Amino acid sequence: MDQILLIVNTRKSTALNLAYRLIGWGKKRTIGFVAPSHESAMLGLPEFDWNIETNPVKFGVVIGGDGTFLRASRMVMDYDIPLYGINVGRLGFLVTGNPDNAEEEIEKILSGAYRIQKRQALKGSVTRKGSLVHVLYALNDLVITKGPLARLIEVESRVNDYFLSLLPADGIIVSTPTGSTAYALSAGGPILPPHVNAMVMVPICPHTLYARPLVLGSEDTISLIPKSDQKEIYLTQDGQLGYELMVKDRIDISIARDKCVSTIELKEDNYFDLLREKLQWGNVSVRQGEEDW
């Protein structure tokens, strides 16, 4: 029996209803669903054993929005489990599946009508007074940001240990290509397609005229060092987990060599069609070469 890992935003009734629908469909198709502990208890599914030596799961289905997909990505980053997202959220750059056609889309994946996109992850290492205190991985971004008060922070940035800048700003985003359409885009950063082997550093509301986003290569290391006396400075991981920083902590960020996230794309899907649809770049019915001149 094929096994599929089911990861669901259980706070959304639409996500739960779709999950129950898929479970019922799977029973008729002799497809078994397993789930992480929380979803297992909510949906009455067998709990996936993360310690099993031989992985029986063919792929994972994520039901929710991009936030649910980011949570799922951290779960599977150490496992060879590609993910397919079904969108019951809002924008949905990572969860591209249509809930109305969920069964049909899963059938296509089971038949092999898909391709795998290997998405880079960031590795962030936090060093405090010479000691390593955190090692973090993120599919979208790692962000240094200020606390709730409207006060700037100063962050020193270095690239491959060469001094780059001392920037007064609300914070700094370091993003993967996957995350370039998330927070980094809102802060004025460029869009990098997921196959581009790079990362981008984007200041948040810099108090200077010269600050610009910077694209860096896969072999580069960005080092960020808070210099402000402000007490509340944080490092956030994919906008979901936060870590308090101290002045003169050093955060070294690079493309992870040992981890990535595999995502499933149906053969008819195209990243640039997705961009046009989500960012509303003109009429989606117009295709290259089909214009009526």
Image (cartoon, rainbow, N blue to C red):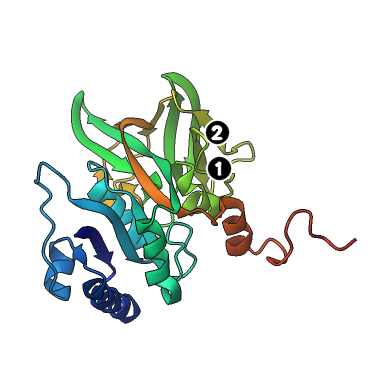
Give the amino acid type for the residue marked by disc 1 in the picture. Answer: Leu
In front of the other: 50 or 279:
50
| Relative height, residue 189 to residue 226 (above, below) | below
Q: Is residue 101 above or below residue 172?
A: below
Question: Between marks 1 and 2, how big is the CA–CA gap?
Answer: 9 Å
Q: Residue at x 47, y 21 (%)?
A: 163
Q: Which residue is mark 1?
A: 192
Q: Which mark is residue 215?
A: 2
* Front residue (pair 248, 65): 65
* Residue 192 spot, x, y in % from top left: 55, 42
Task: Decide which of 140, 45 is in the foreground and name it.
Answer: 45
Determine the image quadrant of residue 225.
Answer: top left
Kindly identify the residue that appears in the image at 61 percent across and 63 percent down.
Answer: 277
The N terminus - image quarter: bottom left
Specify whether residue 113 is in view: yes
Residue 122 pos. (x, y %): 36, 37
Compared with 163, 66 (above or below) is: below
Q: Amino acid at mark 2?
A: Val
Choose the circle earlier in sequence order: 1 or 2: 1
